[in-house]
Image (cartoon, rainbow, N blue to C red):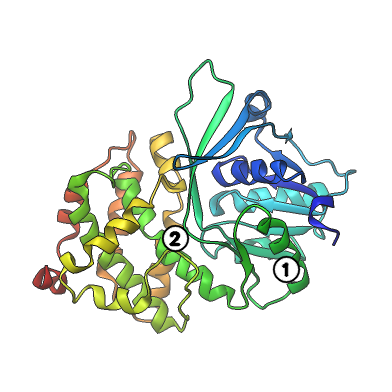
Amino acid sequence: MTMPNKLKIVIYGAGAIGTTLAAWMTENDYDVSLLARREKVRLLKQQRINISKGNEQLIKDCKLKIIDHLDPNEHIDLVIITVKNFNLEQSSQEISEAIGSDTLILGLQNGVVNQEILPNYFTKVIYGIVNYNAWQSERKKSSNSLNWNVNINGPIILGTPHNRLQKESQQLVTLFSNFISCHMSKGFQDEAHAKLVANLGNAVTTVIGNSQHQASALIPLQRVLTRLTYEGVKTLKVAGFKESIAGPLPSWRVIMLSVYIPLIFTRSLFRKKLALIGRTSMANDILTKGVGISELHTINGYLLGLAKQHNVEVPYSESLYKFCQQRFSVFPFKAVTAQQLSDFLGRDPVQQHHE
């Protein structure tokens, strides 16, 4: 594998992560193309990309190289696939049919379902955990810019389930480290499952219509997310996974004690964590389209399956999953308030006693 700035890179998927990564790489003089659906290509070719983190401008007026297909006759060193798991099978088939199975692949999907799909199509696959979320600001009709906001909650973590391709993984760490914190993990499955627990709240913020920063949402959301995270970590512990300290979660000790501590004592910590939550990819799928497929099954549903496999009782998580399934399937989608969600799920007896 050649030096990062000499690689021929294609990012497959022009969503939030794909577009922002393409902009960062372009600004760092990488040879990178962003592959988008044909209906988006014309628009993206006319736009320049801006990225902001709070009040800080990270990238301004970046012009991306946009393509709408893979050329079988063109050598590609690395394909970074950013489509979500529910589109991954079709995308992987299209990529392998176009350029074969031997190109190095980096899969950047939430969850671990990609580990079941990508090896069916490619011989060299590295997986990544993206600890930032990105969302697009409202665009003026006359503007030729796409403005993206990012919250960075931790490093990009790269690895494989069995610690293969370590040389290639380290070279990709070098590539990403030029613009964002990145490291390779030899305990990748622990990292990936800890990120799944962190992502359980995506369904919560989606079903309340991204109203998590309203003052009235603070207390009911603390009640909901505290219990949800507790059940997630309890499941991981029983299933034999180890704690990861790289992601956005508090320590497992704090999480496991949280349901026995009056919520008022952990409210300042929760408020800081809540402030970091922006618009998630699940919210983009449901709120933008009004209804449709989301990552609910591959995130919340996967952990429910893991809990069932290890006989862990997770009633709160089960109720949330069923509630979101129902709400996400009705068009047009109508959000509930944080208080309504909390009331529906009910108060956990232990939590209620300690509030």
Instruction: Where is residue 42? Give x, y as percent.
Output: 67, 24
Establish if 103 lies above or below 45: below
Residue drawn at the location 67% of the way across and 29% of the way down: 41
Establish if 98 lies above or below 296: above
Q: Is residue 279 left or right of residue 147?
A: left
- The amino acid pointed to by label 2 is Ile
Residue named by callout 1: 170
Instruction: Where is residue 77? Give x, y as percent.
Output: 82, 54
Res 121 → quadrant: bottom right
- The amino acid pointed to by label 1 is Gln
Establish if 152 lies above or below 239: above
Residue 319 visible in the current orientation: no
Instruction: Where is residue 92? Give x, y as percent.
Output: 69, 52
Establish if 98 lies above or below 244: above
- Which of the image's four quarters has the C terminus? bottom left
Residue named by callout 2: 299
Res 347 → quadrant: bottom left
Instruction: Where is residue 95? Give x, y as percent.
Output: 74, 49
Q: Secondary structure at mark 1?
A: helix
Q: Is residue 99 left or right of residue 128?
A: right
Q: Is residue 183 left or right of residue 151?
A: right
Residue 263 visible in the current orientation: yes
Label 1 packing within 10 angstroms: few (<14), some (14-19), many (20+): some
